[in-house]
Every structure is written in structure tokens, then in C-alpha cells.
Image (cartoon, rainbow, N blue to C red):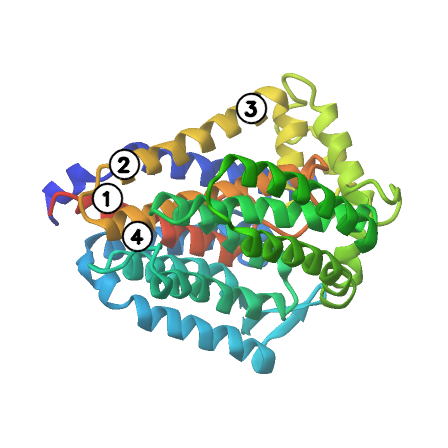
Amino acid sequence: MNNQLLLRVDWWAVLCYFILVTFGLVNIYSNIYNGVTLSLFDFSNIIGKQVWFFIICLIIWIPVLYINSALFEHLAFILYSIMIILLLGLFVFGITISGATSWYDFGGIRLQPSEFSKIAVSLLIAFILSGIDAHLNKRQTFLKFWIIILLPALLIIAQPDPGSALVFMSLIFVFIREGGSFYVLILSVASLFIFILTILLNPINTSIGIALVLILIIYYVRRQSKKNRLWSNFLILFGCIGFSFSVNFIFNEVFEQHHRDRINLTLGLIEDVKGIGYNVNQSKIAIGSGAFNGKGFLNGSQTKGGFVPEQHTDFIFSTIGEEWGFVGSFGLVLLYTFFISRIIIRAEKHTHSFPRIFSYCFASILFVHFAINIGMTIGLFPIIGIPLPFISYGGSSLLAFSLFFFIYLNLDANRLS
């Protein structure tokens, strides 16, 4: 083994990884514990499966770490193409769970390609943007960037799994970091704002409001600027109004009924604590009952009573809040913050753009997963099936995020090569 390479490994990040995975296993065990000691290596139970997936992650760690880092650049397009084929194959060979055809079943072992597609997209984006002539202000590079993201995102939406597709929008942070127009971020925020307003009000009222605001902005800008951009301003105006009227179609025809219910619940348009809002309500009760210090490991009454559906997957944070309290919850947030910040800080030390861009992709996706998942459990975001990285139960999620992390370690350790 190359001892010099091991010395250059980001061991602080490795420590964060092991703490997160171990903490995840502890809380998954607590979630399914029913008074009988469970074997950690029994593949027939949930904790056993997660432990074996973790062992597989450890087995692939060293080979990935010692792969020539240039190989990731050379294979970026091939891996992306394979991932698109796998996403397309789901419409023929995939199995449907909870209304989404998102998994392949290999003799009882289920894998979700959308989890791994984040790695393939990140590799290809890093490869494209690290080109000599690549610049996001150029139309060709701009189009390539968004096509790389939108192609798998649309295939995932068609499964339908809009929650997993939404994660790709986290790469807008990479777009801004690499010199893309800041107006794209403003446009994204404005689109979300218009989407919410249209649901809360209606397309006509929203359009009137948009028109009044934009006319005032256009008037002010024209008085301050000598440049006449009247046509472009009116193009933005009609584009926003057109988007507002398209929201109804997207909301009613693209989203499934349970997606619509969850969005309406989050926006306060409906209240249904015994129906669609049951998960979130019980999750908030569990987190609140943990108070400051928590009830202790294996002592969560909400967890033991099975009041929170899917608690070992998307709602694992409610177990943490109940049994470890504010101390454990806040400690977890601090750990994620340190982990993500370290990835970004190390990324800025790269002289070559490929590893820097890939590291930013990893940090952005990790942040959005972490923020949305916790937001879901406390009712700030709709329930969209986003797992908590390294902690939630799920072999595909653990394998994908671990592989994502191992590639980051490889590129970071070879920074001076």
C-alpha cells in the first residue's frame, strides 16, 4: 500500500463518516428493537441488512481509494450513459413500491438507480466544466450543464419520484461557484415563490400580482439605467405569468395525489393529523417529547409504540430527537455542518478544477439531503422521501453516499499528485 496516500487522506472526514454510519445503525436498531436482542449480522432483519451493506462499503473503500484519480475523468461519460440506461430500464424491469417504480430486485436485494445517478451526474458535470474552453457563460457549456442534470431528473420524475429528482437542483450551488450567472439562482427562487403563490391563491390573482410588481421594477430599472431593455423585461413578465398558469397542470397532472396532499398540508391548506398529516404529527410529537436530554437509548415511547410510520427510513431523525433529545439532535446538525464545511474548504485547495467541482457536487447534494430530511420530520417541508445520508435505513442510499464519499477521498488525497 502507498503509505504517502494514506497520510494525505482526509481522516477528519473519515471520522465524521464512521460516526454518522455508526449513529445510524444505533438508531435503526433502537427503532426495530422489540425487547428481544437482534443479531447484527442476520440478513433477515433490517439492522442485519444495514450492517452487511456497511461491510460491503468498507470492502470497496480501499480499491476506490487506490484507483488512479484520472480514471474518474475518463469514465465520467460512460458511467453517466450506463446510469441513463438503468433509469430507462426501470420502466420495463423495475418493481413498484409505494407507487414509484424506482427499484431493481435482485433476489430480494433491491437497488435504486436514482441514488447512484447523483454520482454519475456529478462526475460528468465535473468533467465538462473542467474542460479548457468550458465556461458557464458560454451557451454550449450552459446547455450541457443543464441537460446533464435534467435528463436523469425527468426520468426520475416519470417513475414518479419527484423528491429524488428535486435533489439535483442542489447543483445550482455548483453552477454559481463555477462562474454561472447569479440570475439563475434568483430565477429558481422566483419560480418556487410563484409556484407556492399559485397554489395558495390561483393563476389569475398570482399573475396580477406578478405583473404589478414587475412593472414597478421595470419602471425603476429603466429610470436608473441608460440601456433600453424593454423587450427583455416584458419577456420576463410574460414568462412568469405563463409559468404561473402552467403550475396548475404540473400540480394536478404530473404530481400524484399523495404529493399534492403533502404540499397542501405543508402550506396549511388542509389539516389532517389522522390521515395524510399523521406521519409528520407523530414525528413532531416524538421529537418534542425528547426534550433537552432525550429519553435514552431504547426508551423512546413513540419509537417503541410504532407511532411514526417509516421511522427507520425517512423519519429516523424523530428517533434521534426522542431518544437523544435536543443535545443529540443539535450535535448531529453540528456534525453534518462540520463535515460539509470541511469538504468545501478542502475543495478550494485543489489546483485542478475536476476534483474541486466534484467535491462541491458532493457537498451540495449532501447538504440538501440533510436539510430537506430534517425539514420533513419537523413539518417545514413536504414529505418527499429524502433519506438522511449515512443514517437512514436503505442499502442503496448507504452504498451510493459511501461511494460518493470514497471518490471524494480519492480525489482529495491525490490533490498534490
Q: Which one is nearer the viewer's eye here, 35 or 290?
A: 290
Q: CA distance from mark 4 to mark 2?
A: 14 Å
Can the viewer see residue 29 in this picture?
Answer: no
Q: Is residue 357 left or right of residue 289?
A: left
Task: Mark 2 and mark 1 in contact? Answer it, CB < 8 Å.
Answer: yes
The local crowd at label 2, few if under 14, some if 14 to 19, many if 20 or more residues have their Cα within 10 Å, is: some
Residue at left offset 79%, top offset 64%? 252
Q: Identity of the amino acid at label 1?
A: Asp
Residue at left offset 59%, top offset 44%? 189
The residue where tag 3 is placed is 330
Q: CA distance from mark 3 to mark 1?
A: 28 Å
Image height of 416 relative to 74, above or below: above
Image height of 300 relative to 138, above or below: above
Upstream in sequence: badge 4 or badge 3: 3
The residue where tag 4 is placed is 407
Q: Position of residue 58 (x, y in %)?
A: 34, 50
Place residue 162 in its image quadrant: bottom right
Q: Position of residue 256 (x, y in %)?
A: 75, 63
Task: Mark 4 and mark 2 in contact? Answer it, CB < 8 Å.
Answer: no
Mark sitting on residue 412? 1
Mark sitting on residue 346? 2
Image height of 291 relative to 220, above or below: above
Query: SS class of the residue under badge 1?
Result: helix
Q: Is residue 294 left or right of residue 278?
A: left
Residue at left offset 48%, top offset 26%? 334
Residue at left offset 74%, top offset 56%? 259
